[in-house]
Image: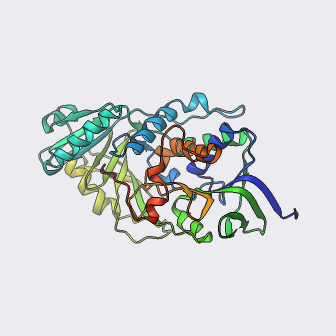
Amino acid sequence: MPAHQHLFDIAIIGGGIIGSATAYYLVQQNPQLSVCVIEPDPSYELASALRSSGGCRVQFTGTENIAMSLYSIDFIRNFERTMATAQHPAPVDWVEGGYLFVVPPEDTRNLERNARFQQSQGCTLDLLSPAELKDRFPAMYVGDLGAGVHTPHDGWCDPYGLLWGFRRKAMELGAQYIADRVVAADHDAIKAKSVTLSNGQVIRAAAFVNATGAWSGDVARLFNMSLPIAPVRRFEHYFTPGSHVGHLPYVKDTARLAFRSEGQGYSGGLVDGDVPRGYNFEVDHHNFENVVWPAVAHRFPAFEAARCHRSWAGLYEVNELDGNPVIGAWNARLPNLYTVAGFSGHGMMHAPAAGRGIAELIVHGRFQTIDLSRLGYERVEQNAPYPEQGIL
């Protein structure tokens, strides 16, 4: 083999939270595998997970999403104990702060139906009336609400710690990280053969995994694969109220307001799904004042005198088909090309389950713990959206 070529069993494109979780589970399940992870930026300056709020919740309606959440939350809760390496601890600062979804009266029946289903799947929750919401969260305005669901065992963690914990553990178990960017791919009619890096090196492998998040649509095109995943800019803000509010869970509503307690203040934003697609990290410093502040102050009047201390931008990897991840092989064309991307804001929380799932598919030829077949690429080819009715 020429000096500029390298051969691996599996080449993972993208070394963020999803790619690193996949690498960990691959070498954990089969220590004999040679696995490389190709990541252009080892500093992870623009990594989506590191610009997120680190939330983890079970409040979905899809069986697969709920199962992934239950597994992932338990895994993250025990992360520091199970994922430390010989050289490094693995702190993730898990906070079991809970999640609270609130809805107007016209959405109450849907919320109640979702809650019953979540309970049937093993989730712990409290369905609350407006009076019960006011009693539990006195600072909240409930006059326009129909109900809320509080899931007390949900919470949030430090995405930076989670990413580096997965990466260091994967490396300790034998995965090799390559700091470069994939610029081209070689394949024939039935098989992906190699990728070329920006430095000219060629990586050949028996299987390839596209775990490049917001960039996964572009990477898929290198293999002539159509993947409806696009980068969407979102903002996160750190702010404090004018008077005491107290500890809050991760609060979400149907207008896509989402914020939670963070230290002495609060962190969150309001997602606009209609923003132009693209790799845009420019911060709109009027976003908090014009969009987030009115929504937060309406729900919690103490935020009328809120002060925003810091704002930053990150990317959602939005699956334009249905807002849910693509997890599986391209069975109809290049069955050794696997995709695990398109989480649309849920990548960090589902990284343990998704990484385990794609590793099972590669190592064993099928999903073994959670059947994620309905999240496969076939639904994209059939234009059949995954039926998730939870608040996204």
Does 352 sit left or right of 96 as displayed?
A: right
Q: How is the image coloured?
A: rainbow
Q: Give coordinates of residue 3: x percent, y percent.
A: 88, 63
Residue visible at 15% across and 37% down in the picture? 129
Residue visible at 32% across and 30% down in the picture? 124
The image quadrant that residue 264 belongs to is: top left
Q: In this rendered view, identify the residue nearer to me: 245 or 78.
A: 78
Residue visible at 38% across and 43% down in the picture? 63
Residue visible at 48% across and 68% down in the picture? 280
Does 346 sit left or right of 47 as displayed?
A: left
Q: In this rendered view, identify the residue nearer to me: 274 or 29.
A: 29
Asked if residue 15 is positioned above or below residue 225 in the image, the reply reads: above
Q: Give coordinates of residue 267: x percent, y percent.
A: 38, 47
- The N terminus - image quarter: bottom right
Asked if residue 358 is positioned above or below residue 7 in the image, the reply reads: above
The image quadrant that residue 86 belongs to is: top right
For this orientation, the residue located farthest to the top is 81
The image shows a total of numbered marks equal to: 0
Q: Give coordinates of residue 274: x percent, y percent.
A: 34, 68
The image quadrant that residue 179 belongs to is: bottom right
Q: In this rendered view, identify the residue nearer to me: 286 or 376.
A: 376
Q: Give coordinates of residue 198: x percent, y percent.
A: 72, 69
Does 50 sit left or right of 285 as displayed?
A: right
